Image (cartoon, grey):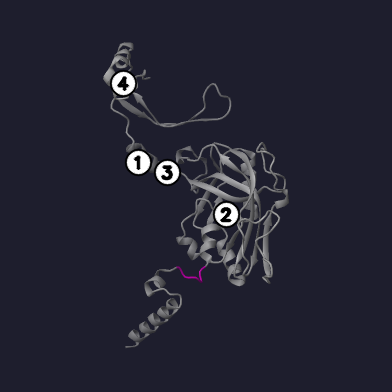
Amino acid sequence: MRVVLAASLVLGAMSFGTGCRGRNLAAGLAGTPAVEGQARCGVTKSQARPLIIEWPSPERATLEGLVERGSGLVAVRYEGCEMELVRRCQVAGAYRYTAVEPKRDDQMFRSADELYAKIPIGAAQLEAELERHGALALEMTVVGHYEAAREQVTRAELRGECERATHVVSMVTVGAFKLSTAGGAEVSAGARLAGGPGVGAGSTAERGFERSDGEPGRCSYSGGGDSAPPERCGALLRLEVEPIREPDEVKAERERRPCPRGSVLVEGGRFRPVTVREGMVAIADFCLDQDEVSVGAYAACADDGRARTRRRRCRPRI
C-alpha cells in the first residue's frame, strides 16, 4: 500500500511539473534534466557551423596561430558541446584568407535551446547568465574567412597522434564581436555598424557581463586583396568542420560506385611528385581499363555511327 501511494505521489508531482509547461508526462520523462548543465550536451547533435565566441581564450589563440601559420589543416575532437584541438595530429593542407565586405550579424538569445543551437561551445556556462538577465545580445561583424582548399579528409591521411580527432576545420570566419546581457532588449538585423543591438530607445535594460574581441571600427574592406584580416579585427567567430571519413565509410562508398566492365578501380591517395620539391598531391579514385586500346579499335569506334548516336565518346584508354 505504501509503495503504491509513494508511486502515485511521484507521478503526481511529475505530472504537475510538466503540466505547467503544457507538456505531457511522456515528454517530461524523456526530457533532459534542467538541473544538469552538461546533460543537454550529451544528447545535443554537434553543429557543423558552431560559434566559438565563448571558447576559452587559450584555445582560440592557439587555433588562430595554427590557421595563420599555414602548416596544415587543424584537427579537433568535437562531441556535443565540447571541442578540443588535437595539436599533435598532422593533416596536409593550408588555409587561404578571403576578405569580404564587412557584414553585421546581430542576434538575440532568449532561451537555452537557442544557445545550444548557435553557441554549443560554452552554452552551459552562458545558461546561468541567460536565466539571470533574460536575454543575451550578440553583436558580430564579419570581415572574411580562412578556407581550406580541401574539405574531406580520410583517417588514412592523418599523421601523428590522431586517435582522438573526429573533425577537421574547413573554414574559420573572422571579425569582431561583443556578447552582453540585456534584459528585454530588441535586436535589429539591419542595424548600422556603429549601432548596437543592446538597449533601444526608452529601454531600461541593465547590462550584466560583457565578452568582446576585436574592434568593429577597425573592420574595414580594401577590395578583397588582403592576405589577412585588418589589425584588431581578426577575432575568431565561427568554425565550419567536416567529419573525418573513416575507412568503413570510404570502403562502402567505393563499393557503391563500381567501375565499368573491363576496368578496375585504382584507389587514390596522396603522394609527392618527382617534379614538385615541396608539398603533396591528392589523387581521387579512378577507373583504369585492363587492356590497351589499339589504333584500329579506336578508329572503328570513331567510325561507328551507332556509337555516336548513343553519344558514346571514343578515346584512347590508358
Mark sitting earlier along the chain (4/3): 3
Query: Residue 112, position in %: x, y?
Result: 53, 66
Pick the front one: 84 or 123: 123
**Callout 3 environment at 10 Å: few (<14), some (14 to 19), or many (20+)?**
few
Q: Amino acid at mark 1?
A: Ala
Labelled disc at residue 185? none
Name the residue carrying label 1.
252
Name the residue carrying label 2.
51
Name the quarter where the N terminus is drawn. Answer: bottom left
Query: Residue 291, position in %: x, y?
Result: 31, 19
Above or below — where is 267 with respect to 62? above
- Residue at the image position 70 percent from the left and 45 percent from the top: 220
Name the quarter where the C terminus is drawn. Answer: top left
**Which is in the foreground here, disc 1 or disc 4?**
4
Question: Residue reaching furthest bottom?
Answer: 1
Q: Secondary structure at mark 2?
A: loop
Pick the front one: 199 or 248: 199
Q: Secondary structure at mark 4?
A: helix
Labelled disc at residue 308? 4
Name the residue carrying label 3.
246
**Which is in the foreground here, disc 4 or disc 3?**
4
